[in-house]
Image: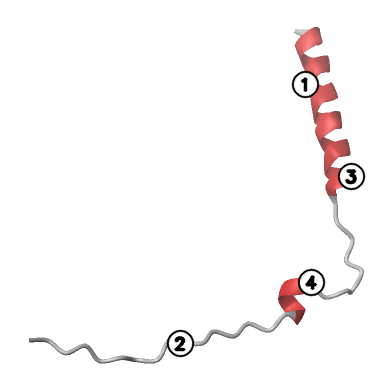
C-alpha cells in the first residue's frame, strides 16, 4: 500500500511540474488571427434557366 501511495504522489508531482512548464506567458503581442483581416468574396449570382 505504501508503494502505491508513493507512486501516486510521485506521479502527481510530475503532473504539477509539467503544468508549470506548459503555462504560457502573455507578452501583449497580438496573434495572427487578431491582426489578419478576414474577407470573403461571394460569387456573383448567376441565374440558371430551367426548361
Whether label 2 touches label 1, CB < 8 Å: no
Whether label 3 touches label 2, CB < 8 Å: no
Q: Which residue is drawn at 59% across and 85% down?
A: 39
Relative placement, left or right, of 29 versus 35 is: right
Q: How crowded is mark 1: few (under 14 residues within 10 Å), some or many (20 or more)?
A: few
Picture coordinates of residue 26, whole percent (x, y): 88, 66
The quadrant the C terminus occupies is bottom left
Q: What element carries label 1?
A: helix
Q: In which quarter of the image is residue 6?
A: top right
Mark 3 vs 2, N-terminal side: 3
Q: Residue 18 carries which label?
A: none
- Using the image as rendered, state which of residue 50 and residue 10 is in the foreground: 50
Distance between the alpha carbons at the discs numbered 2 and 1? 57 Å
The mark lying in front, picked from 3 and 2, is 2
Q: Residue 42 carries which label?
A: 2
The mark lying in front, picked from 4 and 3, is 4
For residue 26, above or below residue 19 = below
- Using the image as rendered, state which of residue 8 and residue 49 is in the foreground: 49
Whether label 1 touches label 4, CB < 8 Å: no
The quadrant the N terminus occupies is top right
Distance between the alpha carbons at the discs numbered 3 and 2? 45 Å
Q: Which residue is drawn at 86% across and 30% down?
A: 13
Distance between the alpha carbons at the discs numbered 2 and 4? 27 Å
The mark lying in front, picked from 3 and 1, is 3
Residue named by callout 3: 21
Q: Is mark 3 on a helix, strand or loop?
A: helix
Residue named by callout 1: 8
Q: Hey, which residue is sitting farthest right in the picture? A: 27
Distance between the alpha carbons at the discs numbered 4 and 3? 21 Å
Q: Is mark 2 on a helix, strand or loop?
A: loop
Distance between the alpha carbons at the discs numbered 1 and 4? 38 Å
Amino acid at each position: 500500500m505504501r508503494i502505491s501511495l508513493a507512486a501516486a504522489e510521485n506521479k502527481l508531482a510530475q503532473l504539477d511540474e509539467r503544468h508549470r512548464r506548459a503555462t504560457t506567458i502573455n507578452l501583449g503581442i497580438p496573434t495572427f488571427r487578431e491582426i489578419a483581416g478576414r474577407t470573403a468574396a461571394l460569387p456573383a449570382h448567376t441565374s440558371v434557366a430551367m426548361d
